[in-house]
Amino acid sequence: MSRALVAIVVLLGLIGTPRQSAAQNEDQTCDRLPRNVQIYEMFRSTVQLLIEQSQTLQRQCRIIAAAVHVRIVIQTRSPEAGPARARATIARHEAGALRATIVLPISQEMPELLAHELEHVIEQIEGVDLAALARRDSSQATRDHQGTFETARATRAGQAAAAEIETRQAELAIARRETRAANALKASLRKPQ
């Protein structure tokens, strides 16, 4: 076998590996942002906290971490920058590598928007043909006049992450109130009567 053919076979094997690894790593935890995701340092802890509070974001994190051919840059923008919500720009290179840039507005909707845009990246990791899907089933994918695709799958992922984080934050608020009440009760019991 020629060296060029061996190199192509090895490269194709590497490109196929992320999908297999993602399935194998489905039950592992994702306790930090994957190395193939870049984000401004000042927002890293916020995104990490969102991941910790959402099973949907944890699932996405595991899939993206296993996809060694993917690089994601997450950028934020001020809400004053305009009415646009969020967007992902995804480019596939000849060798199969994916490069995605996700731009998120800083807002209360960040958990939903982040999960939504990450799901679009995962659709591309999995090789989903959005144009064919939109032609086949407009309830699952649509294409607007600018050529941008929207999928029901990404919408569901965003809504799930938002609900999970809202539930987790409510649980934490209740736990904090219960701790304060317990501490107040202990303090009142210690006071001499």
Image: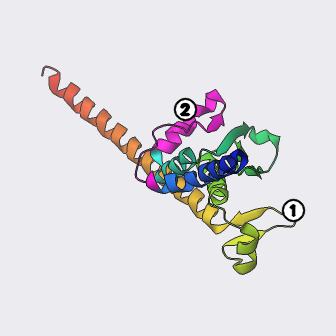
Instruction: Please report whichever mark, 1 or 2, sits nearer to the chain's N-terminal start.
Output: 2
Q: Is residue 106 visible?
A: no
**Is residue 31 on the magenta stretch?**
yes
Please identify the quarter of the rendering in which residue 75 is found.
top right
Q: Please identify the residue farthest to the front as the structure is shown.
A: 1
Residue at 77% x, 49% y: name it: 93
Q: How far from the left and from the top, in percent, is residue 189?
A: 16, 27
Between 93 and 47, the one nearer to me in the picture: 93
Q: How far from the left and from the top, in percent, is residue 155?
A: 63, 62
* Circle 2 residues within 10 Å: few <14, some 14–19, many ≥20: some
Mark 1 and mark 2 residues within 8 Å of each other at the beta carbon: no
The magenta stretch is: 24-52
Q: Residue 173 carries which label?
A: none
Q: Please identify the residue farthest to the top as the structure is shown.
A: 192
**Is residue 146 on the magenta stretch?**
no
**Does residue 127 sit above or below 49 in this rendering?**
below
Q: Can residue 189 be seen in this view?
A: yes
Provide the secondary structure element on which disc 1 rests.
loop
Q: What residue did someone put label 2 on?
A: 45
Looking at numbered disc 1 in the image, what kind of residue is underneath it? Answer: Gln
Provide the secondary structure element on which disc 2 rests.
helix
Q: How far from the left and from the top, in percent, is residue 180?
A: 32, 33
Q: How far from the left and from the top, in percent, is residue 142?
A: 75, 70
Residue at 87% x, 62% y: name it: 146
**Number of numbered tags placed on the structure image:** 2
**Does residue 128 sit above or below 80 in this rendering?**
below
Residue at 61% x, 65% y: name it: 153
Q: What residue did someone put label 1 on?
A: 146
Looking at numbered disc 2 in the image, what kind of residue is underneath it? Answer: Ser
With 177 as the anchor, is 67 left or right in this view?
right
Work out which quarter of the rendered image holds the C terminus and state it.
Answer: top left
Residue at 75% x, 38% y: name it: 77
